[in-house]
Image (tube, rainbow, N blue to C red):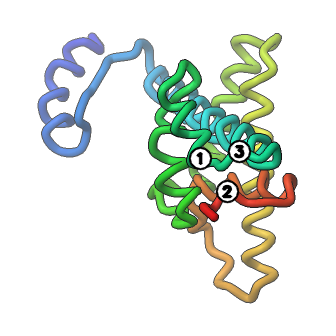
């Protein structure tokens, strides 16, 4: 019944087989909660970065130039340093994490936030946006006579913002 014994015993096996780092986070479910919050933060950074770049593009600033400045400033994140330039600006949208799974994790994070910090507003809003993007991409895939599967990449959530802005972030 001692979780530290289980962690100590299983940690080498887990780290050698599929996890680079194993951290005991607390009682049962804590690891899942941390993962969900991590993923909603990743989503927030992706969406905020894209929204900022879209506003700057409409202002007349090239997205690549904007990222050069942002990534040497306090607003940088993994999303502005890697996902946006590598997966969105290039149009590849191939980070490798599926949008439906991210939308699910965001719903879990929103549920945790609602239960533990009901005054919070940002996590539920990010969850709402990621789930809207997922639904829009699913609807679009069904309307285009495609397989309609759930293979949309998480970076494709940016397409919803691009549609709202009436422009895209691809390099010109």
Say what secondary structure mark 2 lies in: loop
Q: Residue 100, how many percent across, how many down? A: 62, 55
95 or 124, nearer to the observer? 95
Q: Earlier in the sequence, mark 1 or mark 3?
A: 3
Tell which tag, 3 or 2, sits nearer the viewer.
Answer: 3
Task: Identify whether 146 is placed above or below 154.
Answer: below
Residue picked out by circle 1? 102
Q: Which residue shows up at 72% across the image and 76% down it?
A: 141
Q: Residue 91, how many percent across, how many down? A: 57, 65
Q: Which quarter of the figure has residue 166?
A: bottom right
Give left or right: position of 22 versus 117: left
23 or 129, nearer to the observer? 129
Q: Earlier in the sequence, mark 3 or mark 2?
A: 3
Task: Identify whether 119 is placed above or below 45.
Answer: above
Q: Which residue shows up at 47% across the image and 39% down it?
A: 81
**Viewer can see residue 37:** yes
Residue picked out by circle 2? 169
């Amino acid at each position: 019944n001692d979780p530290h014994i289980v962690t100590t015993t299983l940690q080498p096996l887990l780290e050698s087989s599929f996890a680079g780092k194993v951290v005991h986070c607390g009682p049962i479910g804590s690891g899942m909660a941390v993962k969900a919050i991590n993923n909603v933060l990743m989503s927030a950074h992706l969406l905020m970065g894209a929204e900022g770049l879209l506003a700057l593009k409409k202002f007349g600033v090239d997205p690549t130039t904007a990222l050069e400045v942002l990534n040497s400033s306090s607003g940088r994140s993994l999303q502005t340093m890697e996902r946006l330039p590598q997966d969105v600006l290039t149009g590849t949208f191939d980070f490798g994490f599926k949008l439906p799974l991210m939308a699910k994790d965001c719903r879990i994070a929103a549920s945790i936030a609602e239960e533990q910090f009901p005054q919070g507003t940002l996590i539920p809003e990010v969850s709402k946006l990621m789930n809207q993007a997922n639904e829009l991409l699913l609807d679009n895939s069904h309307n285009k006579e495609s397989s309609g599967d759930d293979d949309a990449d998480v970076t494709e959530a940016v397409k919803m913002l691009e549609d709202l802005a009436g422009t895209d972030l691809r390099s010109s």
